[in-house]
Image: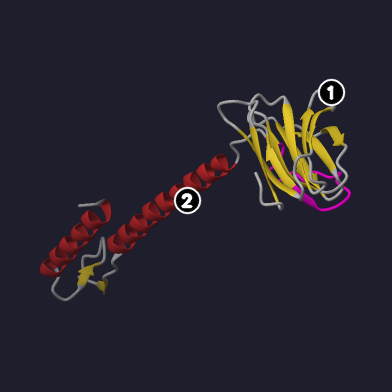
Amino acid sequence: LNFKNILFILFIYIKKMEKRDHPEGEINAPGSENGTKRARTSVFSTTTKSSALTVADEKELKDKEETSTALVEAMRTSELQAPTMQLLGHGDAVHTMRFSPNGNNIASGGFDRRIFLWKVFGDCDNYGILTGHKNCIQEVQWSTDNSRVLSASADKTVGIWDVETGNRLRKLADHNGVVNSIATARLDEHLLVSGSDDCTA
């Protein structure tokens, strides 16, 4: 039995006892010797019911507050300055964006033919711009050691970039069509695969 049920049973029991002792539903006024009667008021029932509701309301309010606090605490688990950060700098549509494997940096590329390098935490500073492609950049990827960025471009080439110096280390121009995708091998960072509109990979 919970607390509310116990109070309800106690209330019913007291009501029955009162009816047995005072079948007319009235009692003598306190301190009256002449048998003056007054209407009986259910002080106990009202107080008990109110107390029960108050306890229930306080418990419900406390549960809501605890739930609300838990939700607020659960909402912010990252080290970002804000849940949403806007990175401004590209001069045209952005086609691709990738986080580095260590989660500290972002590379983005688009129709302006440039690759932007960003810090993830703090003010999300733009710390590097890689230029050299002659057409829009379709996709960027990071090497597994976070030291290089790979790019696939509509200029039919693949670029390999050093993120520390900003230099293009390699330019692969073996495709005869737009290069749409690129990926690195997880077990060997010296291997990569690219896909093109020329139907080759």
Q: Which residues are magenta?
A: 80-95
Circle nearer the viewer, 2 or 1: 1
Q: Residue at x 33, y 63 (%)?
A: 46
Q: Residue at x 77, y 48 (%)?
A: 176
Q: Quadrant of residue 34?
A: bottom left
Q: Which mark is residue 114?
A: none
- What amino acid does circle 2 point to? Lys
Which one is earlier in the sequence, the residue at label 2 or at label 1?
2
Q: Considering the numbered disc 2 on the image, is that residue within a helix, a strand or a loop?
A: helix
How far is disc 2 from disc 1 in space, using C-alphas?
A: 54 Å
- The residue that label 2 is drawn on is 64
- 10 Å crowding of disc 2: few (<14), some (14-19), many (20+): few
Give the percent coordinates (x, y) of residue 199: 66, 52
Q: Considering the numbered disc 1 on the image, is that residue within a helix, a strand or a loop?
A: loop
Give the percent coordinates (x, y) of residue 113: 85, 45
- The residue that label 1 is drawn on is 165
